[in-house]
Amino acid sequence: MRAAYCTLTGLLQGSLLMAALALPAAHGQLATGAHTSTVVSEADRLRGAYGPYRANNDLLYYHLDVRVDPEHQMLSGKNVIRFKMLEPTMRIQLDLVPALKIDKIVLDESNDSRRLLKYERAAGRTVYVDFPETLQQGNTYTIEFYYSGHPVEMGRFGGIVFRKDPMGRPLVNTACEEEGASVWWPNKDQWLDEVENMDISIEAPSDLVEVSNGRFQGKTDLGDGYTRWEWKVDYPINNYDVSLNIGKYVHSSDTYLDQYGPLTLDYFVFPEDLEKAQRQFIQVKNMLKAFEHSFGEYPFYKDGYKLVEAMYSGVENQTAITYGNHFENGYLGRPKTGIGTWFDFIIVHESAHEWFGNSITARDRSDMWIHEGWANYCESVFVEYMWGKGDAITYINTGKENIKNAEPVICEEGTVCTPPVDQYKKGGLFLNTMRSVIDDDHEWFALLHDYYQHFKYQTIMTTDVAAYFSRHSKRDLTPIFNEYLRHAAIPTLELRFDPQAHTVSYRWQADEPSFAMPIKVGSEKHWQTITPVVGRWQTIKTDLDRKQYSEQFNAATDLYYVNVHKN
């Protein structure tokens, strides 16, 4: 298990492209303003909660060893699972979709003896594994979970899909952030506990190439029409990031050199796309420069960086990012004009997840904005590094009219909920707002860098982010985090003018009672900072005349994501 950072409080509880990135709502989820009401099935409760048979053990290692038959769309193999017991018990909980058959589960004991284990399939994907004796606290155990069958496609990108590439050749890809990794392999399918490292062995038809996470270790022709591909992951990894890609790929490589040492860049694309890829993937080096400048070194140097062509837009599979953006700038041909056409959205957004999502990971799906909102904001970080702050502010504000603000960004913890698509753009605009609250760019970028360095390779919650930002900025920022992430509506700045007295009165209309966010008001060349509070009017003097009040007295809405209401 990689370190799971959490405060006591935590224990107790895209730009223009946003619409194209929309995630479907969780089943039974209803928008109710400041709160989300969810009807939770037993299957979702077992899958979403970090229940007693998950919490009693600490994951250490996986070895996923699977044969893939693209012609018959079948899987067969095993996952070797090593874990340390945190309390004495005779049962642990794992997950596998009912469509896949459990062939057997074996306890691999240190004296080379092996015993079949009993198991129980419960609601949904839950698999309870029972042991003949009590597993002792502090001891490490290894089981082999054998399975087989035809996986069923589900979710936005199918989870695991058997397709044909544009030339009619077999193609298999995985994409499991929403669907969960247990759609195609048995594992502890949650976000809090991650293995420290893993091995991946995939047997695929010998006329195809297989690409997975981590560093390539070699391949072996098995002599039966299949080749075994070996990969080693040297870092903690989210279960949903574990991937396989089987297709008629050709390989090209490059090296990125900077103060952290050489980083291998490996690209796997269809043969007819090789020249286009070599031109387009030049952008990878600028992306790495921008993010390493802002956050620190690429998180997975020992495992390298890969892009793998797929038939969907793209997913952030750790060190093996899938890419389907047609080797064009923008996102699947959109937008047609503007800053979004200056770079390849998939390269920038999905690679940002290597820092935020893959290195820093939310402990629960309810806080997925820690992945998606941060990656959205990283797009503007890239723009600022390449073209300057003005373009970055323009970019981050583009498309905000598409935000619905109908549900909170953070949904119900422990229920396999999927936060609304607002988590992308609203999450990015919230961070842009937080930058304006800090109101010192040197301090802001130092905070971003230190935040990443402090939490890298850990699983965290929003309470941890808010506490860290508050402590290091010496401000209580928790009410601002709560207002933007735990309530549906954004705050409204109410302005009331008295032309005869040359005054402006102001207050916040917000759901968080202690919300008191500073904001710049006045005119663009003469901003002044005020700190409204909820429910109480305050007043300032202004030199504007009667006509200028409504036309020229404004709030800096490109720096703060707020509504403004003038009386």
Image: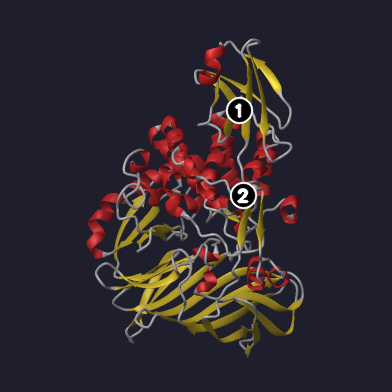
Residue 420 or residue 10, whichever sits in front: 420
Residue 396: x and y in percent read 47, 38
Residue 480: x and y in percent read 66, 38
Residue 36 to residue 230: above or below? above
Query: Which of pointers 2 and 1 indicates the residue nearer the eye?
Result: 2
Q: In which quarter of the image is residue 541?
A: top right
User: Amino acid type of disc 2?
Assistant: Pro
Total number of numbered discs in the rendering: 2
User: Quick one: SS at disc 1?
Assistant: strand
Residue 193: x and y in percent read 63, 64
Residue 43 to residue 240: above or below? below
User: Amino acid type of disc 1?
Assistant: Ile
Horizontal side of 22 relative to 129 (left or right) equals: left
Q: In which quarter of the image is the N terminus?
A: bottom right
Residue 159 appears in the figure: yes
Residue 38 to residue 558: above or below? below
Residue 95 or residue 509, whichever sits in front: 509
User: Quick one: SS at disc 2?
Assistant: loop
For the residues labelled 2 and 1, say whether their Cβ atoms are less than 8 Å apart: no
Q: What residue is shown with label 1?
A: 519
Cα–Cα gap, marks 2 and 1: 22 Å
Give the crowd class for mark 1: few <14, some 14-19, many >=20 residues within 10 Å: many
Which labelled disc corresponds to residue 408?
2
Horizontal side of 18 relative to 222 (left or right) equals: right
- Whichever of callouts 2 and 1 sits on the residue coming sooner in the sequence is 2
